[in-house]
Image: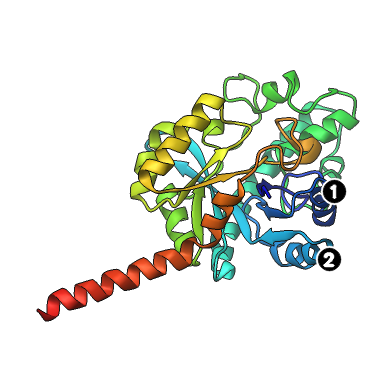
Amino acid sequence: MAADLHCHTKLSDGSVGIEDLIVIANKSGINTIAITDHDCIAGTVRGQVIGKRYGVTVIPAVELSAFDNEAGKSVHIISYLADSPDRLEAICRKTSVARKRAGQIMMLKVAARFPITSEFIINHASGSTNLYKQHIMHALMDAGYTDELFGELYHKLFSTDSENNILAPTKYPDVQTVIDEIHGAGGIAVLAHPGKFDNFDEIEKYIEMGLDGVEVWSPFNTEEQTEALAELCKKKKLLLTGGSNFHGTYGEKTVTIGSYATPQEHLDKLMGYKAKKKRAQRKAEKEAAAAKAK
């Protein structure tokens, strides 16, 4: 069975709740998912409990925001199967605080530009741990200023190319810090949707930083890019994952759960990755000890 290892809920910028997400997965014949809310691990335990009720395995995960200062690009790294997820709380909290500040600034700018209140916008973020662009756009849709989330108005407000954008600067941790934090928590670091932020040229650099895998199957990667990423991962002995980046109605792409997924072969490799690394480490230590004894 295929597994969708990239799904979002209302806890971040998705439009559906945890249980609804799991029910949709179950009805779609997907028996393994990962809830990868942005910089938020709050739904992991609840997701696993509800998942058992519906026969859906929910893999512990979180999508962490980062920034490559050298390349000037956003980077998202997903942590899977952390042994101590609580150790990721600090970096999640720091990013969440920065995002809240930016969200409040953008909300006030929108409330000043359109005849809607801050409270009206905040109501659209009910259940989320933060205020996202999708919530602001949903409020503007309900107020009748647009009939689509990611249309002309979205680009006018949130594109860096727009002279009238309302963007507020948000400081994210660097890629090395995020990868180190994931490994410190006993997790597996996978580069999410490289096609979204054009991270292809930087992958080799991230591998040197300790990257464990790449999200190969994604709605943001073209067929050619998918093939190239698969080859690179095999050559560099990286994990290959896949996920729909499901956000419900808040998604940039129209996707269903499981429309982009991780084949069983690669799911098995992900699940056994840490044990394999530990065996390799023990073997190397024995060989080193034996060589030293000679």
Left or right for 284, reference 232: left
Residue pointed to by mark 2: 53
Residue 157: percent from the left, percent from the top? 69, 26
Looking at the image, which is closer to me, 79 or 3?
3
Q: Amino acid at mark 1?
A: Lys
Q: Tell me if I can see residue 264 in this picture.
A: yes
Residue pointed to by mark 1: 27
Left or right for 56, reference 243: right
Answer few, some or many: residues within 10 Å of disc 1's Cα (few below 14, many 20 plus, some between 14 and 19). few
Residue visible at 35% across and 40% down in the picture: 204
Residue with the most extreme left position: 294
Residue visible at 50% across and 49% down in the picture: 190
Residue 43: percent from the left, percent from the top? 72, 61
Q: In the figure, 142 relative to 105: above or below?
A: above
Q: Amino acid at mark 2?
A: Arg
Looking at the image, which is closer to me, 29 or 239?
29
When asked about the image quadrant of residue 86, the answer is: bottom right
When asked about the image quadrant of residue 151, the answer is: top right
